[in-house]
Image (tube, grey):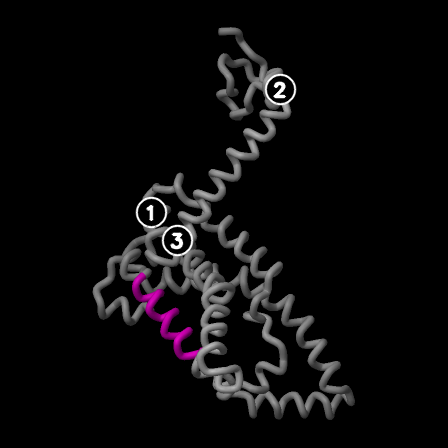
């Protein structure tokens, strides 16, 4: 077999791939238009397979993605951080719900702290001499930036808390970080897909006016997140039932 000189790193090797950097030796066949379509087809089929495998595993088997990935079973999955970033892009391009960057009006109508929020808004409007519309626009613009920062800072914080609470399991911080990514991905999936579906069903069954009570949505959402975290932590950490409840 003829010896090759890698055009990327200058290494001498034999074969179709450089044994130093992995660069492929390209020939005349690689410059055919048909080869471009072959590469595109290969990318799409592998992308689709890994994406839906990861998507299905996160939704239907809480904790399994983290367990497999940390154990070394990775080839069939999207890289967790890459999957999270992809969800963030989808979340920002197709904002079915306001989610983390809820508008000011949403907080004022909140059943729990709406009255307190209204007092703060009235005080700011009075002090600065501005209209509610101006304050609302300013708040929404700032909340967009804040929500993006929160998306990327919540995972390291969650991983740190998880590491402290589950220190007896002697897992690496890396393992806790992967677990935090999986649960954050579920949070995004919940907000981008499941919550809109619940709203559509609710509007259809009882009407939009009757869906104004936020507890009709809030309680199922909180309960769903609690159950997901319970099942995922039970599978990933192998806690007993009591410690799993405390961890959750």
Relative depth, front residue between 23 and 170:
23
Image quadrant of residue 194?
bottom left
Going from N to C along the chain, the mark reached first, 3 or 2, is 2
* x, y percent for residue 20: 51, 23
Q: Is residue 33 left or right of residue 132?
A: left
Relative vertical location of residue 5 with respect to residue 168 in this rendering, above or below = above
Examine the residues drawn in magenta and state their main secondary structure: helix
Q: Which of the pair 191/115 is nearer the observer?
A: 191
Alpha-carbon span between mark 1 and mark 2? 37 Å
Marker count (numbered) = 3
Crowdedness near tag 1: few (<14), some (14–19) or many (≥20) residues, C-alpha within 10 Å: few
- Measured in 3D between alpha carbons, the distance from the residue under mark 3 to the one under mark 1, in whole angstroms, is 14 Å
Where disc 1 sits, the SS reads helix
Report helix, strand or loop for mark 3: helix
Element type at marker 2? loop
Percent coordinates x, y for residue 119 in the rendering = 62, 92
Q: Quadrant of residue 8?
A: top right
Which residue shows up at 31% across the image and 60% down it? 167
Label 3, residues with CA under 10 Å away: few <14, some 14-19, many ≥20? few
Where does label 1 land, which residue? 68
Q: Residue furthest right?
A: 129
Residue 135: numbered disc: none
Magenta-highlighted residues: 217-231
Residue at x 56% of width, y 70% of height = 97
Camera-nearest label, 3 or 1:
3
Q: Mark 3 points at which residue?
A: 56
Q: Name the residue under label 2.
A: 7
Which quarter of the image is occupied by the C terminus?
Answer: bottom left
Does residue 20 lie above or below 123 as drawn?
A: above
Q: Nearer the viewer, mark 1 or mark 2?
A: 1
Residue 224 part of the magenta-drawn span = yes
């Amino acid at each position: 077999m003829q010896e090759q000189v890698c055009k990327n790193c200058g290494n001498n090797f034999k074969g179709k791939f450089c044994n130093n950097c992995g660069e492929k030796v390209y020939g005349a066949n690689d410059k055919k238009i048909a080869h471009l379509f072959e590469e595109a087809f290969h990318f799409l089929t592998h992308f689709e397979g890994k994406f839906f495998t990861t998507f299905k595993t996160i939704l239907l088997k809480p904790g399994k993605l983290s367990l497999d990935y940390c154990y070394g079973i990775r080839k069939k999955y999207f890289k967790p951080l890459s999957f999270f970033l992809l969800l963030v892009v989808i979340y920002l391009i197709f904002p079915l719900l306001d989610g983390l960057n809820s508008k000011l009006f949403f907080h004022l109508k909140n059943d729990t702290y709406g009255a307190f929020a209204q007092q703060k808004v009235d005080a700011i409007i009075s002090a600065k001499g501005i209209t509610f519309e101006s304050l609302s626009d300013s708040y929404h613009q700032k909340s967009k930036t804040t929500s993006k920062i929160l998306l990327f800072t919540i995972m390291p914080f969650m991983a740190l808390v998880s590491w402290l609470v589950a220190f007896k399991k002697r897992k690496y911080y890396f393992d806790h970080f992967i677990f935090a990514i999986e649960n954050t991905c579920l949070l995004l999936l919940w907000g981008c897909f499941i919550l809109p579906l619940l709203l559509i069903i609710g509007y259809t069954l009882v009407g939009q006016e009757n869906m104004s009570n936020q507890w009709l949505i809030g309680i199922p959402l909180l309960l769903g997140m609690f159950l997901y975290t319970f099942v995922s932590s039970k599978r990933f950490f192998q806690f007993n039932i009591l410690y799993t409840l405390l961890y959750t």
